[in-house]
Amino acid sequence: MDALAIGPATRVLVLTGAGVSAESGVPTFRGAGGLWEGHPIEQVASPQGFQRDPTLVWRFYSLRRAAMAGIVPNPAHRALVALEQRLGDRFLLVTQNVDGLHRDAGSERMIEIHGNLMTSRCTTCDRPPFRDTTAYADGTLPLCVLCSERGVTALLRPHIVWFGEWLDPDHLARVEAFIGAGGHDLLFIAIGTSGLVYPAAGFVEDVRYRGGRTVLVNAERPENARAFDAVHLGPAGELLPALLGCGQ
Ligand code: OAD
């Protein structure tokens, strides 16, 4: 397979989804055996679901935290690190994944637009989100210690963007700025994502509008495959190192 043409002026925007972590052993969301099969979205990934049953929601994310033990990045994550090292500021990675594997692999110019599994935040006070690897599997609900010190009982929640919630506007502004930063040699690569969740699913159209090239690497042909100039079907861990010319 020929490597993608990436020249000295090419700027590369990468969007990853759950498929990029599949070969590391992290389940995807949709399809047979996907996370949303056994856990209805509205119950565990919406503000209303959390309000209704925070114990259920914390059990879901606690199980996912615990399941990350021993999970490590795969050749797809590593190929993206190698590309970033080659391109520097001409590279930006946007991930919908909350598993932190891109950071573990060494990616730096990276935005986690859907949050991070190992981060919690208070539902009440404005303390910044903080690292929290605890799996609250025994049904106890975690409280904010800073609020408790002030005599206020406030629940913690996972630092995840749930359905019906807004993405961080700074994140979106950074992506828009990268796409619109001028120069005609823009390449967009979407990897392991079903292209069903917006606004990430709309990046491909934004790049096309700017005249950029669009490439999809996915295990199967998703509904939005026609939006891409080229589609490479197969496991990301096998295809990406070859496509990015960093044969691992
Ligand atoms: P999905 O589960 O919707 O899609 C994963 C895609 O990866 C599918 O199209 C698979 O065919 C593909 N895939 C599976 N294994 C692969 C492999 N080894 N190599 C390449 N591709 C592979 O996951 P996302 O598109 O990431 O949001 O889902 C988007 C968002 O919906 C998630 O961030 C999550 C979810 O609800 C939140 O939780 C907020």
Image: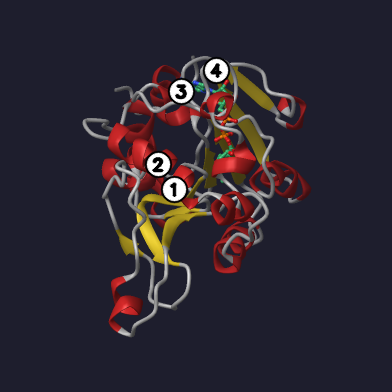
Residue 22 lies, in percent from the top left, at: 42, 24
Q: Ligand 1 within 8 A of label 4's CB? A: yes
Front-most of residues 78 and 141: 141
The amino acid pointed to by label 3 is Ala
Tag shown at residue 59: 2
In this view of the protein, can residue 162 be seen by the observer? Answer: yes
Q: Ligand 1 within 8 A of label 3's CB? A: yes
- Where, by quadrant of the figure, is residue 238 drawn? top left
Element type where label 4 sits in the image:
loop
Alpha-carbon span between mark 2 and mark 1: 6 Å
Q: Ligand 1 within 8 A of label 2's CB? A: no
Element type where label 1 sits in the image:
helix
**Where 162 falls versus 219 (above or below)?**
below
Alpha-carbon span between mark 4 and mark 1: 34 Å
Position of 64 compared to 197: left or right? left
**Where 4 falls versus 56 (above or below)?**
above
Q: Residue at x 54, y 43 (%)?
A: 44
Q: Which residue is mark 4?
A: 219
Name the front one of labels 3 and 2: 2
Q: Are marks 2 and 1 in contact (CB under 8 Å)?
A: yes
Tell me the quadrant of the picture where the C terminus can be found.
top left
Q: Residues within 10 Å of mark 4 (few under 14, many from 20)?
A: some
Element type where label 3 sits in the image:
helix
Q: Which residue is mark 3?
A: 236
The amino acid pointed to by label 2 is Arg
Q: Are marks 3 and 2 in contact (CB under 8 Å)?
A: no
Q: Are marks 4 and 3 in contact (CB under 8 Å)?
A: yes
Q: Which residue is mark 1?
A: 55
- Where, by quadrant of the figure, is residue 226 drawn? top right
Element type where label 2 sits in the image:
helix
Q: Residue at x 58, y 19 (%)?
A: 232
Front-most of residues 190 and 64: 64
